[in-house]
Every structure is written in C-alpha cells, then in structure tokens.
Amino acid sequence: MTFITITVTMFYNCVGLFYNKLYLEKYCYLGSIIKKVMISNNQTKKITLYEKVAENVSRLIDEGTFRVGDRIPSLRKLSSQLKVSITTVLEAYRHLEDKGILEARQQSGYYVRAQYSKIISQPEISEPEISPTKVSISEIIRMIMRESNNPNIIHLGYIQPDPDLLPIHKLNLTLSNVVRRNKRSSILYDCLQGYKPLRIQISRRLLSTGCTVTPNEIIITSGCEEAIMLSLLSICSPGDTVAVESPVYFHLLLLLEILGLKVVEIPSHPRDGIILEVLRMVIEDYTIKACFTTPNFNIPLGSCIPDENKKILVNLLSEYKIPLIEDDENGDIHFSFERPIATKSFDKKGLVIYCSSFSNTLAPGYRVGWILPGRFKADIELSKNDINVSCIYKIFSGGNKNNPAKWRIFSLG
Ligand SMILES: Cc1ncc(COP(=O)(O)O)c(C=O)c1O
C-alpha cells in the first residue's frame, strides 16, 4: 500500500507553518493485478504550542539547517528567540527525543540524531513482469566481476565477512595440522556424500534451524551455490520455468541462465516475503518446475519472513507437488537471541531442498557447503563432484579449544 501525501499550506506564524494534509491512498497491492485509489481528507488537528515548536525544529533539521551531530540552540536561546517559555522548549525537545530525532547529551545539550529509518526507508513490494522470461544477466555480472578487486567499489550484491573478524590464525593452524597429520587422505577423494564426521557436526548445528536430520540426509557441497546448482540440475531441464522471489540473489539468476531455464519473478514484500496469492496464480497459469526463495535475510533486502508465512509457502507448494529450493546461506547471521528457523522445518513430504554453507560465517575461500536433498537425494548424488573437507571437520570437532560457538562471527545470538 502506498500513501501519497499532498500538503496544503493554510497559514503561517512565528513558530512555523500550519497545514492541512490530503492523503491519497493508493492500493498497488499486487502490482498490475489490483489497483484501487482512494482519496481522503484529514482535518488539521489542534496542536499545542510545544508541538508547534517541535515541528519548527524538525523542519529546520529536514531542510539541512541542522545536520546529524549538530548541537541545536539551547533551551534558553530558543525560548528567547521564539518568545515561549523554557518549559515549552524543553517539552518540544523531549518530544523530538521520543521520536528519535534529537538526543540529549549530559551537561552538553540536545543534538541531532542519525535517523536510519529516514536514510533507508522500507522498500516497496516489487512489481516485476509476471510471466516466464529468459534470463540474460551474464553481461552485467561479468562487468561486476571485472570490478571485484577494485577497492573503490563497495559490493552490495553479495556478502563477504571482513577478514579481520575471522579467526584466521586458528583456521590456518588447523589447516596445516590436518594436512601434516593426514598427508595422503588430505589430497584424496572423499566418499560421495562427503566426510561423515563433518556431516555429524552439521546435523547437530541444523537443530537450531528446526530441522532434525541424520548425517545420512546431508550431502557436502562446494559452497551454497553448488548446492543450488545441484538442486536445479536434479529437478529441471533446459527450457523449464522456475518461480523466484523478486528481488533475488543475483548469482541465482546467473545459474538459471547457465542452465537455460526461464524465470517467473514473484513480487515479494520486504517483511512478509513472496506474495503467496500471486505465486498460486502463477502456478495455476504456467508449468512451474521449482520455486526458489531465501526466507532468512534475503539478498538484497536483508529481510527475514515470519515463520507462519514459511509454513504457508511450504504447504502451498506441496499442494501442487512443486519442489522448493531454500537458500539459507544467511540464516546464521542474525542479531536476535535465537536463529530464525528454516522453511525446511515445515517440510513433511521431502519437497524442500535446503542449501547453505560456511562461506558467510567462517571462511568464504574454503567453499564448504551442504544440501538437505529430501526426496531428490539419488539424483543430486548423481550430479555431484567428490570433495575433501577434513580440515573443516577438524574445526568443528576439536573440543573446547576449537569451540565453533566461539567462532560465530556474525551470529550474535
Ligand atoms: C544468499 C546467498 N546465497 C548464496 C551465496 C553463495 O554462497 P557460497 O559462496 O557458499 O557458494 C551467498 C554468498 O554471499 C549468499 O549471500
């Protein structure tokens, strides 16, 4: 829902402008599907003197007279300038403090605060073209890749932990110990599913996602991206169509292009995730072979969808027997007490394929990921390359000395 506000100036006095607001309420809920426009008129409510002062100060901040970090006029100064009492100014400043616009510093006065909600406002629901489309993104990605080592560019399209936050010394020590002790096995192929002790450690970690899986239900991969690639390979053939949330992690689009798959972008709400009504319509109108989503900390939105919506999504897709590929690469990067659960935890039919890795939490360069293939295990194993991951296993099974809990770099929970 979008609000367009038209402000009509009514009159003016020493503490500011009074105005009436016309609210133009525009329902663009499903993009091109439902459009309804409503106009309402909101009468000016009577505002008190301290609110007028607060509005005036707020306007000066909005217009740049006072910027973030600036000290605003003292109570005494503003009260004499506006010819109002010190108590009125104090009330106005407290009002702005409550709204997060000002902050009081002890024995120093009131200062303008950074208002993050103003700097980054919540994005609108995306409005993509809702029909199967051939993907052609490789040229843009090539351009981005060419600039990947340019220190003057901040890459917002993917996450990479700051190396200063990683336990580099411990990682290097462990790596050299493993290689020294396992001279032969560290360079040989491992079993198809990946090193079993590592799978045991991953199955323990997965409990926090709400998934109870045995090591036998896990396959080790070369990062999360290989896990996604294997999922797509096992379900789709060139020319098939995949429903993806919009916006989506840009490398997913590259994978779809490489595999010759078409995409239907589904509008997504930055808080509630994929719009389920649109997904259902798309499923009924087109042949959808798979659906892709990043329910926990989607890139680029960074949003985490409510558990209830995860459950409805899984149930909806299972009603139509459509596999869901879940990218939970960023689920461990949370700031709450508990990690958000995975959509896989609601899967009763083995139709959700869960993909993740240690790239964003431990060591991007090791490229160790995993997949919970559900009912597609046999097909996924068939297309998988063998890898050796004994070093990572050591890190996760080294007892207290190497307690991975202490190594959770971004997960503050
Ligand atoms: C959402 C998402 N999926 C996948 C990946 C790729 O993970 P990997 O490097 O383990 O292949 C990333 C990396 O940042 C990511 O943010």
Image (cartoon, rainbow, N blue to C red):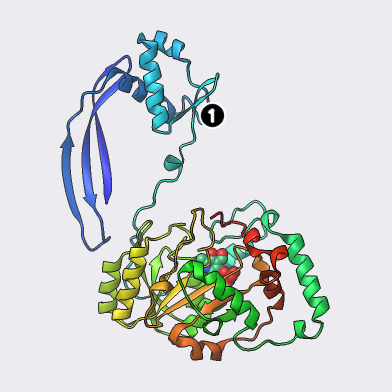
Find residue 367 and report its horizontal and vertical position in percent. Answer: 64, 72
Identify the element where label 1 is drawn. loop
Between residues 393 and 296, which one lies in front from this camera angle?
393
Q: Identify the residue position indicated by label 1 in the image.
A: 69
- Residue 63 visible in this rendered orientation of the protein: no
Ligand 1 position by quadrant: bottom right
Ligand 1 contact, mark 1 (Cβ < 8 Å): no
Between residues 48 and 178, which one lies in front from this camera angle?
178
68 in relation to 316, above or below: above
Which residue corresponds to the image point at 75% horizontal and 63% vertical from the top-left? 170
332 in relation to 124, above or below: below
| Left or right: where 282 falls relative to 375 | left
Q: Give the image quarter of residue 49.
A: top left
Which residue corresponds to the image point at 49% horizontal and 87% vertical from the top-left? 377
Callout 1 amino acid: Gly
Q: Give the image quarter of residue 411.
A: bottom right
392 in relation to 100, above or below: below
